[in-house]
Amino acid sequence: KDDPAALLSRLHRSVQAFDQLIKFSKGWDRDSGVLHSCMKFGNKIISSFIKIVPSLHRCFKTQQEEIKSVLKLLQTSTRALQHICAHAKVEKDARVFKLVPIVKRNLEAMLFKVKALTETMGCLAAFSVGNLKHRNLQGQEVCSQVNENDDDEEEEEEE
């Protein structure tokens, strides 16, 4: 078995790489290939993270600060991943949008695993769940509903 410190070090480097990729993607909102790669890599990171949560349970008492650091960095990255999901829907980017259901499913599974981890370790107060505001890739709040009938409504009003 791996040393918990070595495991957390590798995990932290992976999450940092993910965070850098997500930050890089903010400037490429019109490049479907970059966003598609972010979604694919992000999904792999989230899936891998879900699988190692039991290991985090075992080393939480001795590595609590490092685990919190990883979770905090992962939270900002997953929030940005949610923004990419919303962007794909708004832009009707089929290549990226086809990844949205599995990414969202894994994000939700990760959320429940992290909540269980914090609950088991007696620090549930540090965990909170809130509704995300719909934001574009630059972090600006956008309308949460895409209204496809705007043109039809305007035409009806003119008649």
Image: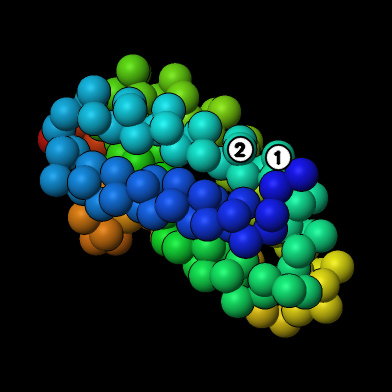
- The reply to whether residue 128 is in sight is no
For the N terminus, give its image quadrant: top right
Dot 1 corresponds to which residue?
Answer: 51
Which quadrant holds the C terminus?
A: top left
91 on left or right of 7: left
Give 67 or 36, whichever is nearer the viewer: 67
Q: Nearer the viewer, residue 13 or 77?
A: 13
Residue 46: x percent and y percent?
Answer: 56, 41
Amino acid type shown at disc 2: Ser
Q: Secondary structure at mark 2?
A: helix
For the residues bearing labels 1 and 2, Cβ distance under 8 angstroms = yes
* In front of the other: 7 or 130: 7
110 to the left or right of 95: right
User: Visible in this render: residue 141?
Assistant: yes
**Residue neighbourhood size for the residue with mark 2, other residues' Cα within 10 Å, grouped as few (<14), some (14–19), many (≥20):** few
**Residue at 48%, 30% in the rendered image:** 100
Residue 84 or 69: which is nearer the viewer?
Answer: 69
Helix, strand, or loop for circle 1? helix
Task: State the image quarter where residue 84 is shown.
Answer: top left
Q: How is the image coloured?
A: rainbow
Identify the residue at horizontal 69%, vertical 58% (top origin).
4
Residues packed near mark 1 inside 10 Å, few (<14), some (14 to 19) or many (20 plus): few
Residue at the (57%, 70%) spot, across then down: 66
- Dot 1 amino acid type: Lys
Percent position (x, y) of residue 51?
71, 40
Q: Work out whether 72 lies above or below 40.
A: below
Label 2: which residue?
A: 48
| Whole-percent x, y for residue 21 in the image | 29, 44
The image quarter containing residue 29 is: top left
Residue 84 relative to residue 30: left or right = right
Mark 1 → mark 2, Cα distance in angstroms: 5 Å
